[in-house]
Image (cartoon, helix red, strand yellow):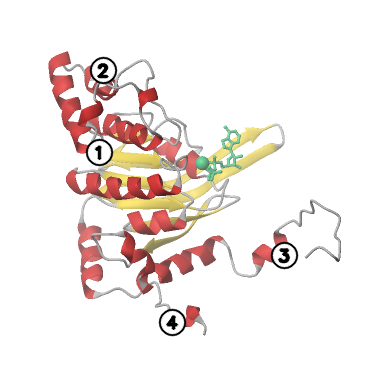
Amino acid sequence: MNNELTLPDYRQQTPEVAARFARLLERPIALEVRGLSKNFETPRGVITALDDVSFSVHKRELLSVIGPSGCGKSTLVRILAGLETPTAGELRVYGEPVSGPGSDRGMVFQGYTLFPWRTVKENVMFGPRMAGQSDFTAASEAREWIELVGLSKFENAYPHQLSGGMKQRVAIARALANQPRVLFMDEPFGALDAQTRSQMQSYLLEIWKNVDITIVFITHDLDEAVFLSDRILVLDANPGRVREVVEVPVPRPRDLGQLFLPSFMGVRKHIDHLIHPPGKAQKEAPVLRLAVSDPDVV
Ligand SMILES: Nc1ncnc2c1ncn2[C@@H]1O[C@H](COP(=O)(O)OP(=O)(O)OP(=O)(O)O)[C@@H](O)[C@H]1O
Ligand SMILES: [Mg+2]
């Protein structure tokens, strides 16, 4: 039986999903990226990490960026967060040109970036305090964000007392406490075990449902991208260019049972083929021999 034939075309959408996308694309553009390029001067010459990348993310959209290792995902998100300057191109948040870091954009990284000497509450209060709020207001706001990520019982704990997943929930609360208009997440669950990772994906969708926030989520995990996203930006490598922006035809609310829906598997297969063109892998993959071949060993 050929399973592939039974999968629907990834462009097929049910009327509900099509209507959802029509509404999404009518929403204001939260983040607009135009002609973004980034060259790195290295001793071995110029590396073009990003080449003429353009896309828009709409208000309250969750857009993932996926692509092979080295295609420029982290470079892209660092430029969007203002941590790196582009060689060319323009970035607008709700129509306003931006350069450099700003509280309108928040960031959650893969590594745990909490202050180890501060409690959960103090970590989350940090941004509001820096923004000039009194300790009292910052603490009460921090409590709300901590409650949102389900860690109220741990507000006085230190990061080393928390699991990896809990630390990332604090990192999300801390980023949200600055009330950014767009949140960038660079492989935030990449260091977690498979079960915690899948729980965190559900948590993130729950948080996103309750907070008015636009998310750009970087991942190299295809199931994660499909599970979370409205649309997926597929990047090519060397140089990093936009290959396609794919609308995920899976209805919301999402749950793990949908991993086996034909619409889920159809779009997954399409993106998998974009990233790993069929037939190419065998030709290019190096053969690594760890032992001398022995006809008696199968
Ligand atoms: N500071 C730098 N100096 C020189 N080259 C860099 C620098 N940062 C990134 N690069 C190069 O730019 C390209 C894109 O790197 P980047 O880290 O953005 O890729 P990525 O898609 O995030 O990869 P991964 O999936 O492995 O995280 C790579 O070729 C990388 O070597
Ligand atoms: Mg990266």
- Which dot marks residue 237? none
Q: Nearer the viewer, mark 4 or mark 2?
A: 4
Asked whether the residues under the numbered discs 4 and 2 touch, taking CB atoms below 8 Å apart as contact, a structural biologist would say: no
Amino acid of disc 4 = Thr
Q: Is residue 264 above or below residue 228?
A: below
Q: Is residue 188 above or below residue 223?
A: above
**Position in image of residue 112 (x %, y %):** 42, 30
Pick the front one: 204 or 92: 204
Question: Could you tell whether 228 is left or right of 146 in the image?
Answer: right
Q: Nearer the viewer, mark 1 or mark 3?
A: 3
Sequence order check: which comes first, mark 1 or mark 3?
Answer: 1
Please tell me in which quadrant of the rendered image residue 81 appears: top left
**Position in image of residue 135 (x %, y %):** 17, 14
Identify the residue under disc 3: 283
Disc 3 to disc 4, C-alpha distance: 28 Å
Q: Is residue 165 above or below residue 271?
A: above
Q: Nearer the viewer, mark 3 or mark 4?
A: 4
Q: Nearer the viewer, mark 4 or mark 1?
A: 4
Please tell me in which quadrant of the rendered image residue 6 appears: bottom left
Sequence order check: which comes first, mark 4 or mark 2?
Answer: 4
**Position in image of residue 114 (x %, y %):** 37, 25
Amino acid of disc 1 = Arg
Identify the residue under disc 1: 181
Amino acid of disc 2 = Met
Disc 4 to disc 1, C-alpha distance: 41 Å
Disc 3 to disc 2, C-alpha distance: 54 Å
